[in-house]
Amino acid sequence: MEARGLTEGDRAQLWRGRVSDGRLIATAIHDGHEVRAEVAQLLALPEEDRLREEDPFTGAWTAVAPTSIVGRRSRFEVDLNRPRENAVYQTPADAWGLRVWREEPGEAFVSASLAEYDAFYHYVRGVFEAVEKRHGLFVVFDLHSYNHRRSGPGGTPADPTANPEVNIGTASMDRTRWAPLVDRFIADLRRFDFRGRHLDVRENVKFQGGHFSRWTHEQFPDSGCALAIEFKKFFMDEWSGSLHESEHQAILDGLRSTVPGLLEELRRIESA
């Protein structure tokens, strides 16, 4: 499907998608680090700072679901988890106080990024509509990660009481309708044996879910449940970018452990 004048080849550079049968979908829309040439020329932000604010390695976790969508472009080119009018960062206030651009992006520059945004949401709508038509209800693993050592590589980590290892954002959904599913997901992920311990999984503590999950609930109010899942970057060094492979793999295993429960709860909701 074509959108906003972008060809199939153009869109292949914006995200990678795997579409298969099943009612579970996994997305990692901030996994990407690539930028188009004109963006690279205008960026003032060093690459290592850009990487630190992206969600590297989250794309691998989309293996939890048969259908997946992984962003390839950096959020500093276009942020797919913000409303369209805020999807291209303009000022430091839009980007955690960071100076993103050498000079203010022009109208054509911004329009090109928003064309990518429109193409992405056009594609996602088509995928979700196909799953809805075939299966009725569906669940989206909206996968993200977040920093917790902002005071520097040797600094004190953020207070764990306000920064859970896993934050589940549910503010934009009909919590009453999806309560059995959300509660089961949280309980199963907490119960998982994470390398001899249990993960700290809490709801709406650090984040309540971004635009992508909100869009899903607005566009598919009766059929789509998007779980905005934010993993604290304990599975990697957020300053060097190095990965702790055993913990990264254990997160995927933990997500997989929730699949039977999610499917069971979907069946119960359907039959209620």
Image (cartoon, rainbow, N blue to C red):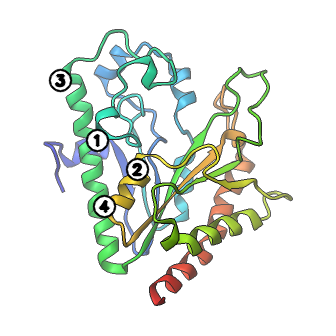
Which amino acid is tagged 1? Answer: Tyr
Q: Residues within 10 Å of mark 1 (few under 14, many from 20)?
A: many
Identify the element where label 2 is drawn: helix
Q: Nearer the viewer, residue 155 or 61?
A: 155
Which is more N-terminal, label 1 or label 2? 1
Closest to the camera, between mark 4 and mark 3, is: 4
Image position of 206 with respect to 180: above or below: above
Q: Which residue is mark 1?
A: 117
Image position of 49 with respect to 267: above or below: above
Where residue 226 appears, as percent x and y from the top left, is: 47, 61
Residue at (53, 28) in percent of width and height: 51
Question: Can you tell which quarter of the image residue 117 is in?
Answer: top left
Closest to the camera, between mark 4 and mark 1, is: 4
Q: CA distance from mark 2 to mark 1?
A: 11 Å
Residue at (37, 42) in percent of width and height: 80
Identify the element where label 1 is drawn: helix
Which is more N-terminal, label 3 or label 4? 3
Q: Residues within 10 Å of mark 4 (few under 14, many from 20)?
A: some
Q: Residues within 10 Å of mark 3 (few under 14, many from 20)?
A: few
The reply, left or right, for residue 104 in relation to residue 53 is left
The circle drawn on residue 212 is 2
The circle drawn on residue 219 is 4
Q: Which residue is mark 3?
A: 108
State if disc 4 and disc 2 touch (CB < 8 Å).
no
Where residue 116 appears, as percent x and y from the top left, is: 26, 39
Identify the element where label 3 is drawn: helix
Where residue 5 appears, as percent x and y from the top left, is: 13, 42
Q: CA distance from mark 3 to mark 1?
A: 14 Å
Q: Nearer the viewer, residue 174 or 41?
A: 174
Which amino acid is tagged 2? Answer: Phe
Which is more N-terminal, label 2 or label 3? 3
